[in-house]
């Protein structure tokens, strides 16, 4: 691991000042990487050890948990502090009762040890597991080294994406919790070094790879994720997260579906659908939701929604099985959610 500057501020104001100062120092020394926030560290420290991430400075947010680590719910929304641990959210009574899709996505994401350490804000910013991205000995990776090519397209790519990919990158977003947030129409709260606050649709936080796969989010320099707001609705209790993986014991998804349904009189009034495992970014399928609205949820309807969800999927040699796996995952999730007793 390369040497780096380290700061552990006591407040948000100090953290924002430290990241701002770090950015200035990086500019002066012409360092290629900007300073970064350190939350749970379960992804960033990993990437630093293998030489993929080389931030010149880290601003540790550990002492800011009192400001940004709360979880609260009322009749309007669920508020999740960005520095809440995954385990805290997964085990919170209101989340378990009213937002089961969130609790399940967190529980299925990682081992208890990792859930005890990793934060919600860090979790949504985790990087792809593409092998070529994670191994700097490979020179061709547009995400790690812009303009260098993509070794995965003609190489090993079974775990990578089929929705949202480009000719420049077919990497997958590996997270689970973010898929539930996208499905439920959450917003993400942001705070800039100058003190400006803004709120974004969570769906808009991550970018598609296009021809700049190295730019993964719309975050501005030094901007801090402070929390997430999940709107309450009559669909959140009838919700679940289904994750399909090679092994049942903590693995990244090959395909996943986050679904939430409002069903009245045997008819779907509203549906919320997120897809994971085979997507370039956290994915909400509005087209699949539209197929379900106003119809009884039987196998034929679920299959029609799944068909719509994968229109436009782009496969490569090792990912030809994925659209069908994704469709079956979504059908199963929808039918299981329809059977839930709420
Ligand atoms: Fe890099 Fe993306 Fe290609 Fe993987 S798929 S090698 S992350 S450019």
Image: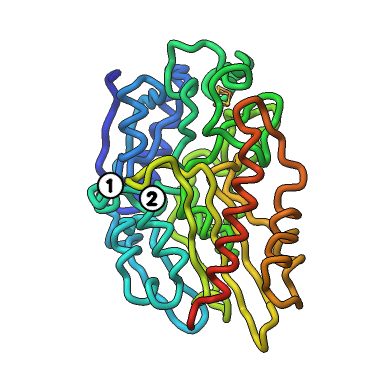
Q: Dot 2: few (<14), some (14–19), or many (≥20) neighbours within 10 Å? A: many
The answer to whether residue 301 is above or below residue 12 is below
Q: Is mark 1 within 8 Å of ligand 1?
A: no
Within the displayed image, which quadrant is ligand 1 positioned in? top right
The answer to whether residue 207 is above or below residue 100 is above
User: Residue reaching furthest bottom?
Assistant: 265
Horizontal arrangement in the rendering, residue 205 relative to residue 26 (left or right): right
**Dot 2 or dot 1, earlier in sequence:** 2
Residue drawn at the location 30% of the way across and 40% of the way down:
41
Horizontal arrangement in the rendering, residue 301 relative to residue 86 (left or right): right
Q: Is residue 105 visible?
A: yes
Residue drawn at the location 36% of the way across and 37% of the way down:
43
State the image coordinates of residue 17 (x, y, percent, origin top left): 38, 43
Return the residue at label 1. 114
State the image coordinates of residue 139 (x, y, percent, origin top left): 52, 10
Give the camera-side residue of 52 and 39: 52
Q: Dot 1: few (<14), some (14–19), or many (≥20) neighbours within 10 Å? A: some
Q: Are marks 2 and 1 in contact (CB under 8 Å)?
A: yes
Q: Secondary structure at mark 2?
A: loop
The answer to whether residue 148 is above or below residue 21 is above
State the image coordinates of residue 108 (x, y, percent, origin top left): 38, 54
Horizontal arrangement in the rendering, residue 95 relative to residue 168 (left or right): left
Count of marks overlaid on the render: 2
Residue drawn at the location 27% of the way across and 62% of the way down:
66
Residue drawn at the location 28% of the way across and 48% of the way down:
111
Q: Is residue 201 visible?
A: no
Label placed on residue 305? none
Return the residue at label 2. 109
Question: According to the image, what is the colour scheme of the structure?
Answer: rainbow
Q: Please tell me whether mark 2 or mark 1 is closer to you in this view.
A: 2
Give the camera-side residue of 245 and 175: 245
């Amino acid at each position: 691991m390369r040497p780096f500057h380290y700061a552990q501020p006591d407040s948000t104001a100090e953290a924002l000042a430290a990241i701002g100062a770090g950015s200035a120092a990086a500019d002066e020394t012409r360092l290629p990487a900007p300073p970064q926030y350190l939350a749970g560290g379960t992804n960033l420290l990993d990437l630093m050890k293998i030489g993929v991430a080389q931030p010149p400075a880290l601003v540790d947010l550990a002492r800011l948990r009192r400001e940004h680590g709360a979880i609260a719910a009322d009749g309007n929304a669920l508020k999740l502090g960005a520095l809440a641990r995954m385990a805290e959210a997964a085990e919170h009574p209101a989340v378990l009762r009213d937002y089961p899709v969130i609790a399940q996505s967190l529980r299925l994401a990682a081992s208890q040890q990792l859930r005890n350490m990793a934060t919600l804000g860090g979790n949504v910013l985790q990087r792809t597991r593409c092998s070529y991205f994670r191994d700097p000995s490979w020179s061709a990776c547009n995400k790690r080294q812009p303009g260098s090519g993509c070794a995965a397209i003609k190489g090993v790519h079974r775990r990578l994406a089929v929705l949202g990919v480009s000719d420049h990158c077919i990497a997958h977003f590996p997270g689970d919790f973010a898929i539930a947030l996208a499905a439920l129409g959450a917003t993400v709260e942001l705070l800039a070094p100058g003190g400006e606050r803004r709120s974004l649709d969570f769906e808009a936080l991550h970018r598609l790879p296009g021809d700049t796969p190295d730019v993964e989010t719309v975050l501005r320099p030094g901007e801090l994720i402070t929390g997430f707001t999940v709107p309450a609705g009559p669909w959140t209790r009838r919700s679940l997260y289904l994750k399909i993986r090679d092994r049942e014991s903590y693995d990244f998804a090959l395909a996943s579906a986050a679904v939430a349904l409002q069903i009245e009189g045997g008819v779907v009034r509203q549906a919320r659908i997120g897809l994971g495992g085979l997507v370039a970014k956290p994915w909400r399928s509005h087209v699949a939701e539209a197929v379900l609205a106003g119809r009884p949820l039987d196998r034929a309807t679920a299959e029609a929604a799944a068909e719509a969800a994968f229109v436009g999927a782009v496969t490569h040699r090792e990912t030809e099985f994925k659209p069908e796996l994704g469709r079956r995952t979504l059908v199963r999730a929808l039918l299981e959610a329809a059977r839930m007793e709420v």
